[in-house]
Image (cartoon, helix red, strand yellow):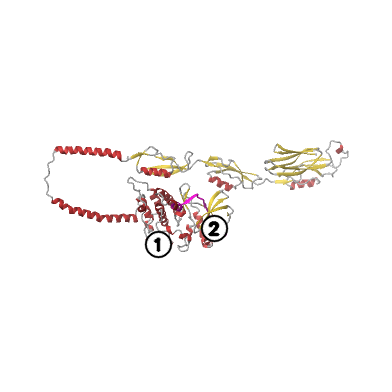
């Protein structure tokens, strides 16, 4: 296994494996985030037809964007290696949770089921059937929310069968009957598999088990599982009916679509009589048949009871009738008073022991949705989430407002709408220095920020195209949606290298200056032993790096002085000396070297430098000399020479 995939993804460790793939934790070096790499096993990458189908389908599935679906970021095909780059979700699979804790409490199972159904309904609306819904492919993240994975890999399995594919063998416990028979699949196959997952969550066991996958598949075709509420006593009848309807053998007897499953599960909060409320039209097929069977069984018993009662009637009529006694008016009045008193006492007692028809709405603010649902169900009212907003007061996932307000009177079975917190409106500015503009844009977008003004500047520290400065420092807290201005590098600023002009005639010197990208500055003449029109001094040292179009001043020989003015004591010494000057720039800016000797003061080097850059040069001087080195206007060193 390569340690670096696609020159971008740094493999960290193996975190899982299955029949079709091995999963690794990796670091996306471009976007500085963790990802999951799902590497397909060799037997799949060797099939060219499969590879073409895989890439086509994976591109379509990568477009899915849903809170309860693990996102696909990238598709890599590196020679014989094929893999998916996916969202990394911290958590555990639903299978791991069930193996560890056993059956999941039914309210929590309903919460998971609604999220799974909504995610699959979204996929179905995009014409994608999962085909491998199972608890191993459902991840519960650290916020106790569902993330479905392995869209894409399951979609590539159109040509596989139970007998030869390891991935399919591991999924046989969740097969729909039509999958087991090898028939053409529809969206209803995901509904059946979801029914198996719901069954497994509620009971802690799978509905069908056997020694081999083929036997399990046959049970899916031939057998009917026991109702979940016959195995776990506190499961509402309505929920048991939903599971039974999902697990119908005939696809047409299941729910019409996955959204109908989500709606039915959402109707599960308790009603007045303690039973679950099932969505309209949810109970048909097996549940209706079971009700009819129960009614048919009860009919003979009721008929027998009526016959027994009828047989006993003649015996009673055979008794000698007693003559009716004459009722007295006084007795009737007393009886009437007694009845009124009993009714009054009964009403008073009922008011004391019966639950009120109305109650005060509790304050759900600060609760998680799960805690609020539990409290609401204990009171016989419903909770529904209507949206989410940023909040500085409440943590992410907590309720920040509700309708109706706390303290308002509400009747049983009514619904309280709540808004959840998306967390703080503040976000942390990421460090984008050294990133390309595209990468920086992605990093800021992940932090809910935007790129502001983009300017460009030269930099000796960053390559062209990289961010060299950001207007707001990394790790600063700012409002989401804010903009951050960036400065992009143009690369190192262009420079010119000063040629050696001393000893050349003036015309040749001018040509060399222009060819080097520099300009001729001032030209002065002085007598010397050199030939006439020969350059005897230059203002910028030979070999030094300076900004393009910098000017070079020249001193040119006018030939020997007939009056020998060079020896009058006021002219510079005729003996030229050299001094090596080396300096490391302590910071960025414009560095200048100013030479003062018997000839006077002149700037022998001037250029922009970066922090830590080393500047060297050999300079000619006469008599005693001082080299003053400045960075911008600040003297940073002085060198004396004699």
C-alpha span from label 1 to label 2 = 34 Å
Residue 218: numbered disc: 1
Relative placement, left or right, of 299 versus 287 is: left
Question: Which stretch did the figure color magenta?
Answer: 75-98
Return the residue nearer the eye: 296 or 190.
296
Relative placement, left or right, of 221 versus 535 is: left
Task: Confirm whether residue 285 shows in the render.
Answer: no
Q: Does the magenta stretch include residue 84?
A: yes
Q: Does the magenta stretch include residue 61?
A: no
In the image, residue 369 lies at what x, y percent? 43, 44
Pointer 1 or 2: first along the chain: 2
Which type of secondary structure does the marked residue at label 2 adopt?
strand
Return the residue nearer the eye: 307 or 539.
307
Relative placement, left or right, of 12 versus 422 is: right
Which type of secondary structure does the marked residue at label 1 adopt?
helix
Question: Which quadrant does the N terminus fall into?
Answer: bottom right
């Amino acid at each position: 296994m390569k340690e670096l995939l696609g020159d971008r993804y740094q493999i960290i460790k193996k975190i899982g494996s299955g029949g079709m793939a091995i999963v690794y934790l990796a670091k996306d070096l471009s976007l500085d985030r963790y990802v999951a790499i799902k590497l397909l096993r060799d037997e799949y990458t060797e099939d060219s037809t499969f590879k073409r189908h895989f890439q086509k389908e994976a591109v379509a599935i990568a477009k899915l964007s849903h809170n309860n679906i693990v996102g696909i970021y990238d598709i890599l095909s590196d020679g014989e290696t094929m893999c998916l780059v996916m969202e990394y979700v911290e958590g555990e699979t639903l299978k791991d949770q069930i193996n560890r804790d056993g059956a999941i409490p039914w309210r929590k199972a309903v919460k998971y089921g609604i999220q799974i159904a909504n995610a699959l309904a979204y996929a179905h609306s995009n014409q994608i059937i999962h085909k491998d819904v199972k608890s191993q492919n459902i991840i519960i993240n650290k916020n106790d929310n569902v993330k479905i994975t392995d869209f894409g890999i399951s979609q590539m399995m159109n040509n596989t069968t139970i007998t030869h594919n390891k991935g399919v063998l591991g999924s046989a416990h969740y097969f729909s009957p039509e999958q087991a028979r090898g028939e053409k699949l529809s969206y209803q196959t995901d509904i059946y598999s979801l029914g198996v997952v719901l069954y497994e969550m509620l009971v802690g066991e799978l509905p069908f088990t056997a020694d081999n996958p083929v036997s399990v598949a046959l049970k899916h075709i031939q057998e009917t599982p026991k109702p979940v509420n016959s195995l776990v006593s506190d499961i509402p009848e309505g929920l048991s009916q939903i599971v039974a309807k999902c697990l119908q053998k005939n696809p047409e007897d299941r729910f019409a679509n996955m959204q109908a499953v989500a709606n039915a599960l959402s109707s599960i909060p308790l009603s007045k009589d303690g039973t679950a409320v099932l969505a309209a039209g949810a109970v048909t097929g097996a549940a209706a048949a079971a009700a009819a069977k129960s009614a048919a069984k009860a009919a003979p018993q009721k008929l027998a009871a009526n016959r027994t009662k009828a047989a006993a009637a003649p015996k009673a009529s055979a008794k000698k009738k007693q003559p009716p006694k004459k009722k007295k008016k006084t007795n009737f009045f007393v009886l009437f008073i007694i009845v009124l008193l009993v009714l009054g006492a009964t009403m008073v007692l009922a008011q004391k022991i019966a639950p009120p028809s109305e109650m005060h709405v509790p304050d759900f603010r600060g609760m998680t949705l799960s805690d609020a649902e539990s409290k609401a169900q204990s009171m016989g009212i419903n909770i529904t989430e209507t949206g989410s907003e940023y909040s500085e007061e409440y943590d992410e996932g907590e309720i920040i407002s509700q309708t109706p307000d706390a303290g308002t009177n509400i009747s049983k079975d009514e619904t309280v709408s709540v808004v959840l917190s998306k967390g703080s409106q503040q976000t942390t500015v990421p460090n984008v220095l050294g990133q390309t503009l595209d990468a920086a844009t992605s990093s800021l977008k992940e932090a809910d920020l935007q790129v502001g003004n983009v300017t460009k500047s030269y930099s000796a520290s960053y390559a062209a195209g990289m961010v060299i400065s950001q207007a707001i420092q990394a790790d600063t807290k700012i409002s989401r949606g804010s903009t951050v201005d960036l400065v992009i590098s143009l690369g190192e600023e262009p420079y010119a290298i000063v040629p050696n002009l001393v000893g050349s005639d003036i015309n040749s010197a001018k040509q060399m200056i222009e060819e080097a990208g520099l300009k001729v500055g001032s030209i002065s003449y002085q007598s010397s032993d050199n030939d006439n029109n020969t350059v005897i001094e230059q203002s910028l040292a030979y070999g030094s790096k300076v900004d393009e179009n910098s000017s070079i001043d020249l001193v040119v020989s006018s030939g020997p002085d007939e009056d020998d003015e060079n020896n009058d004591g006021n002219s510079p010494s005729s003996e030229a000396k050299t001094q090596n000057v080396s300096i490391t720039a302590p910071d960025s800016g414009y560095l200048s070297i100013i030479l003062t000797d018997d000839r006077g003061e002149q700037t022998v080097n001037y250029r922009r430098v970066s922090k830590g850059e080393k500047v060297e040069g050999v300079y000619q001087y006469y008599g005693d000399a001082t080299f003053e080195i400045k960075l911008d206007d600040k003297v940073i060193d002085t060198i004396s020479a004699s």
